[in-house]
Amino acid sequence: MKGQVQKFVVLLLFVVCLGFIFLSLPRDFEKTMGGGFDPEKVEKIQVDLLPVGGQAPLGVTLQQGDEEFGKLLALLEKPTYSRTVSKSDEITLGYEVKLSFATSEAWAWQYQFMGGKLVEAGPYGQTKNYQISGGEETQQAILDYLLTLEPEPS
């Protein structure tokens, strides 16, 4: 009986380790967004930038087919993403960055910077935390591009 318990514990630890390894493997942007995300089905991306310094927020809506829409998706698809349980609310880039993705039916997915090298992404209400490859440097490159977009009038 004692030998069976030991075998069960070893097997359980093995399965837990495999699960942890699987979760921490880098994934691409489409898998990170989850919930059936397909860039071809996304019709709009809402970009919201909230300056940390208290200035007025900036917002722009990109439509599928716009050059800026394609460039933003390319920037988001370039890095890889690894699951993490880390959390941070330290905004270090000077802006809170939130992107919302819509199909013809609904605003279905969100993606936002969470401080440091973390992003939160996925279907609304089911987002998860990820580390983005390149960390803050990658986030800064995405933010720099977003700041070149023409904001919508308030």
Image (spheres, grey):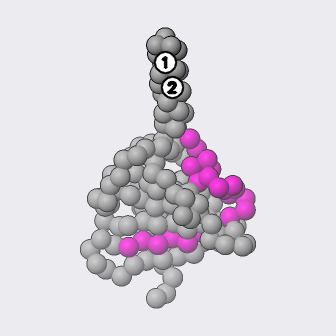
Q: Residues within 10 Å of mark 1 (few under 14, many from 20)?
A: few
Displayed quadrant of residue 103: bottom right
Secondary structure under tag 1 reads: helix
Q: Distance between the Cα atoms at labels 1 and 2?
A: 10 Å
Query: Which of marks 2 and 1 precedes in the sequence?
Result: 1
In the image, 6 versus 119, the foreground residue is 6
Q: Which residue is mark 1?
A: 5
- Assess whether mark 2 and mark 1 are in contact (beta carbons under 8 angstroms): no
- Say which residue appears at 46% left-offset and 56% top-offset: 120
Relative height, residue 17 to residue 33 (above, below): above
- Residue 21 visible at all: no
Relative height, residue 77 to residue 20 (above, below): below
Q: Magenta residues, as a range?
A: 25-50
Q: Amino acid at mark 1?
A: Val
Q: Amino acid at mark 2?
A: Leu
Q: Which residue is mark 2?
A: 12
